[in-house]
Amino acid sequence: MPRPKKPPSHGRGTAAAQREVMLLRIALRNLLYDRRRCAASVTGVCFSVTLVIVQLGLFVGLAANSSQVIDRSPGDIWITGRSTGNFQWGQPIPKRTLTVARSTPGVAWAQELIVGWTQLRHPDGGSQQLEVVGFDLESRVGAPWHVVAGSLDTLSLPDRIVLDRSSMEKVGVFQLGDHREALGHSVRIAAMTDGLTSFTTVPFVFASLPTARTLIGYIGPDETVYVVVGLEPGAAPAVTLSTLRQRLPHVDVFTRGAFSARTRRYWMLETGMGIGFLLTSALAIAVGAVIMSQAIYAATSEYFPEYGTLTAMGMRRWSLAAVVIGQGVVAGLVGSFLGCMIGALAVTAIRQRGLEAVFTTELAVLTIAVALITSALAATTSVRRVWTLEPALVFRT
């Protein structure tokens, strides 16, 4: 006689769900019972997340700002002087490099770009260092963006320059058509940009190639600083890159992405600036973890008899751990969202001050994830204490 089939049982799944709901309720009640400690936990996480958002926002923003001319310029390959670590400190290379690049198979076009430094005199007699970017007016490779006054076409006239409005704090108030003196040459402001700031805080000045050579002074007519190369449709970047390196053994050849990353890596890591941002972020996380750990431990210690009762009733150790960790996760979640909102407002205020900072969804999600993991880890001290409780503790209280 065949055995009767057992009816499908949903009791086990329902019981598990009910247990999870019960554990969450216990965690919330424990967390909210002492509102001062709850506020301390949430405030600690909020402080950490806000500081991390601001620090990482500045880190990412400054890193992108350091390579902005590279990223915004057309072209697939950059040719630089030997051991050039970043865009800002380019070294002169022979101008014949441009001719060799143009005659290389797979190259559609190649243009030179000059980067150097000059001194601009204030109307009151002082001076200010400027970072000069000289570009080809026809191709506009390396040209400024966000032009709000004047026209780049007027740069074809001698001694015409482009300045950003933000540079008024350092070179004095100016208007379109004003004259300034740089290295003994009188230059005229032919166009103005808005929001084009330099990573080094030294203002940019854009000009035509002849004017840039005059302003810099140390780059001769047979020299340039960078050669930007555009590839023909269908050309293999790796093959063209290898060919250029063989034909130009005395310079460095990078893809645009590689030179951009090299510039960001130099300023963020090799100078120690980025390490400072990361250490500050790690310190903020550590401070928040300590505050969270102390608050949760204090809240847990008040319920030791109750935890002992649950242990005596047969509640598993992992269920007890879920209650304690749940308090940390809930406090971490609330503090993270508050911290992200305050961090977004702080980043907006920083950008209004002319500094580069970003707030992205990816950055917020990453910070919240780190905060939740840290909050859960901060609760482990209390978990270990709860696991060591004796069930008989309930009879001694």
Image: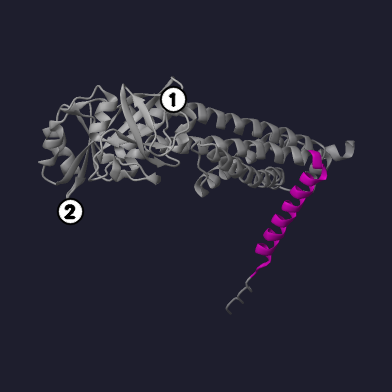
25 within the magenta span? yes
* Image quarter (top left, top right, bottom left or bottom right) of the N terminus: bottom right
Residue 209, located in which quarter of the rendered image?
top left
- Residue 307 numbered mark, or none: none
* Image quarter (top left, top right, bottom left or bottom right) of the C terminus: top right
Along the horizontal axis of the image, is 339 left or right of 245? right
Give the magenta range: 9-36
Answer yes or no: is residue 86 visible: no
* Residue nearest the viewer, comparing 262 with 222: 222
Along the horizontal axis of the image, is 317 left or right of 129? right
Q: Residues within 10 Å of mark 2 (few under 14, many from 20)?
A: few
Looking at the rendered structure, the secondary structure element under dot 1 is loop
- Name the spot of residue 68 as percent of width and height, x first: 37, 39
- Residue 234 numbered mark, or none: 2
- Name the spot of residue 177 as percent of width and height, x first: 38, 38
Q: Which residue is mark 1?
A: 123
Answer yes or no: is residue 192 visible: yes
